[in-house]
Amino acid sequence: MLGNPTIFSLAIVEKEKERYYREDVSKRLEIFNSSRLREIYLELGDGLSILLYFSQPSIYYEQNRGIMYIECYPDDLMKEFEKISLDSSMRELEEVLVGIDGFFTGFIVDKSRIIFFRDHVGAIPCNYRISDGSFMAASFKKIMNGGVGLPPGRILVWDKGSLKIHRWFRWKQLDGDRVQELKNRLVDVFSRYLPEYFSLSFSGGIDSTIIAFVGSLLNRSFECVTVGTENSIDFQWAEEAASILGLRLRKVKVSMDLVKNVVEVVSRYLVNPTSMDKCIASVYYLVATNSIDDFIVSGQGADELFGGYYKYIKLRREKNLKYVHGVMMSDLLRLHETNIERDYLIVTVAGRRLIQPFLAKQIFEIALSTPVELKIDLEDDVRKIMLRKVGEMLGIPKELIMKPKKALQYSSGIQKLVSSMIKKPSYI
């Protein structure tokens, strides 16, 4: 499996604008250790040129009239993407994408035509900007001056200055025993997505516990990494879960000085980060930098998929199921903007690669097909009902299944430290 992270910066520009773009992007790429990036320059004709900076994609090739670049995971997707060529039509490309269950971002530049495509959930970041007849794109917003994320499940076509975005992902409504189906799909997905060796961002909550339990059943070799203050809930629960399940656990204890330093680092890469962004990014950075493995596996996304946030319970009391369903759908469809780029970026900066198996298409489709009442229980104030039932079916001890987990930034104790730092501006 390919463990090294990859980034890219692409521009299709008029020749007289090459110098400006090259100077601008070079400055922005400095914080990403641009010395390890490969530079490609191609003339397309009609006064246009390709300028591309990139590192280690899954698939890359170039001809005198264009290039293809694809980053994907798991690695078995590469044989599917090899069906695509520079001459592929929109229909041929869509047929390939519909048949794929995995994470990917890719683009084809053929003469003046640019085609970008992204997986169903946006698990691998991709942003673009159109300005003064030029098309620019990059993995992360920090590389660009402005830009927006390409919506997940879409194909973007920029041809002779016109922009069109097509939707290729249409999820299928599922019926029947959703809990049994989710259990079967989780095991199937984890068998494909979990690397042979990895580090697991571990809190002792139901999400990371299920990953650890199934990972053990699959004979994967991994270490659980927990970040927190000395008396944090995450340390307490992670130690308990690791002891019960026989897991290897590495505890990363944070202090005010350590968090101060890490927040300063992650803030250089994030665009207009909130306090919550800084907290969560700091946790991922510490997990990644304290990992001995190239892959970092996370349970992120499960809260949006299966009703893990307390706000869903609160809204159910105040509104109705239809309203809560709308909020959940909005949270799911905005994951690529709110969580994914931040987490993927910070793990990449640390030299690791992030995998979020709960976001796999098979699991994503079940979550979209599941009514709110099967995700949260208002009377007993229980969230993630389906995941807890799956945990029970798998044989996870009940005391680990029913823990009412808090949000990462609070349970780790980092939010309290960051809040203290904000009151002292000299720290940030």
Image: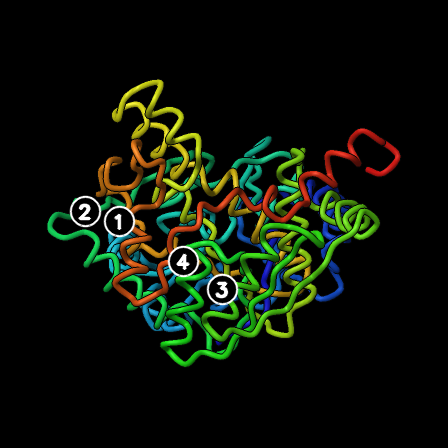
Mark 1 or 4, nearer chain start: 1
Q: Disc 1 marks which residue?
A: 365
Whether the residues at callouts 1 and 3 have beta carbons within 8 Å, the answer is no
Q: Of marks 1 and 2, which one's residue comes earlier in the chain? A: 2
How crowded pointer 1 is (Cα within 10 Å; few <14, some 14-19, many 20+) is rated as some
Q: Is residue 159 in view?
A: no
Q: Which residue is mark 4?
A: 399
Quarter of the rendering containing residue 291:
bottom right
At label 2, the amino acid type is Lys
Q: Of label 3 and label 2, which has the lower sequence position?
A: 2
Secondary-structure class at tag 1: helix
Residue at image coords 32%, 58% = 88
Is 111 placed left or right of 371 in the picture? right
Residue 326, horizontal then vertical, whole percent: 32, 27
- Structure colour scheme: rainbow
Q: Looking at numbered disc 1 in the image, what kind of residue is underneath it?
A: Glu
Q: Position of residue 43 (x, y in %)?
A: 58, 55
Disc 4 element: helix
Dividing the image into 4 quarters, which one contains the C terminus? top right
